[in-house]
Image: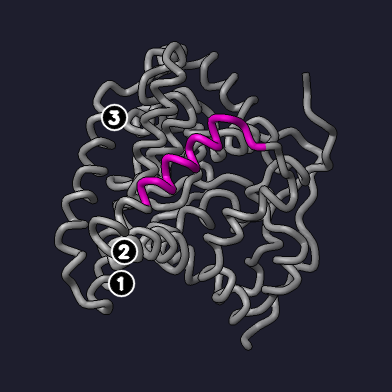
Amino acid sequence: MGAHVSRTDFEYTYNEEPHASRRKAILAKYPQIKKLFGYDPNFKWIVIGMVLTQFVSFLFIKDCSWPIVFFLAYIFGGVINHSLMLAIHEIAHNLAFGYSRPMANKLLGMFANLPIGLPFSVTFKYYHLEHHRYQGDEKIDTDIPTYLEAKLFCNTFGKLVWLFMQPLFYAFRPIVTYPKPPTLLELCNTAIQLMFNFAVVYFLGWKVLAYMLGGSLLAMGIHPVAGHFVSEHYMFHKGFETYSYYGCLNAITFNVGYHNEHHDFPYVPGSRLPQVREIASEFYDKLPHHNSWVSVLYDFVFDPEIGPYARIKRKHKGLKT
């Protein structure tokens, strides 16, 4: 079963999350970074193009054999779907149309959701913004694994299984640990997605639906682009809770790898995050970072010091009003 993880609990801290203080220090020295705030006018066209690319691919997938369907789902469709998930992450910060047009952002998010097959665009925003505001909070930050996950998947083989099952944990953990009543917009998101899925099956067949859902699930598990789930906040160096990745896969993931920069400046679109690092390089060069998401996944599985317990947590203090 492999080596047992060396940690027996999460790393608790009583310090505030580091991003607010670093943001303040950076803006004091480099106020010009504020000029990078705001939405990216090209972003919506990229998202629309990706969705249309998936729609066109459906026409070819419907006539493929089942092995080819899942092969293409892993190497092509899943990559686009994962990129669309990260587009929805950008949209959650209103970086498609700006804060003055919230409904336009939400509608684009639901459109980007269509090829993914699983309705999550609206729900993701509600939880993700709290992940930013209450990073590490043992109740509110649902990005942190549960104690049950950490205890069950506590050796090399278990961590490998956990990575395969990561899409399920990512989807259902918030519902179990921090449930919220569904909103009307969430119900609309679900209804629109289910109608789209039904139309796909009716007009194109089950293979296309399997390509959609299979690609989404495969690309969130043992897949190079899924390395960001682990690289962003798992404690690879003691005391550091957020890590950036500066590798080539940023090109197809809206620069989500620039994660310290993103948490420091969530109002800066992904396309401009490299400029943040360039301007304030002395703040980021000294921070530990990753250069390979594949290496991140390998180290997560085989390094006994890393596992679901390798997260920094804070005692829950309740929501601020």
Q: Quadrant of residue 274?
A: top left
Query: Which numbered disc, 3 or 1, marks the residue that appears first in the sequence?
Result: 3
Q: Mark 3 against mark 2, which lies toward the viewer?
A: 2
The residue tagged 3 is 43
3D distance between C-alphas at marks 3 and 1: 29 Å
Residue 34 as seen in the image, left or right of residue 114: right
Foreground residue among 194 and 101: 194
The residue tagged 1 is 70
Q: Quadrant of the C terminus?
A: top right
Q: Residue at x 15, y 62 (%)?
A: 60
The residue tagged 2 is 211
Q: What numbered label is drawn on residue 214? A: none
Q: Of helix, strand and loop, which one carries label 1?
A: helix
- Count neighbours of disc 3 (C-alpha within 10 A) and say few if under 14, some if 14 to 19, many if 20 or more: many
Query: What amino acid type should be assigned to the residue bearing mark 1?
Result: Phe
- Count neighbours of disc 2 (C-alpha within 10 A) and say few if under 14, some if 14 to 19, many if 20 or more: many
Write down the region rendered in magenta. 182-197
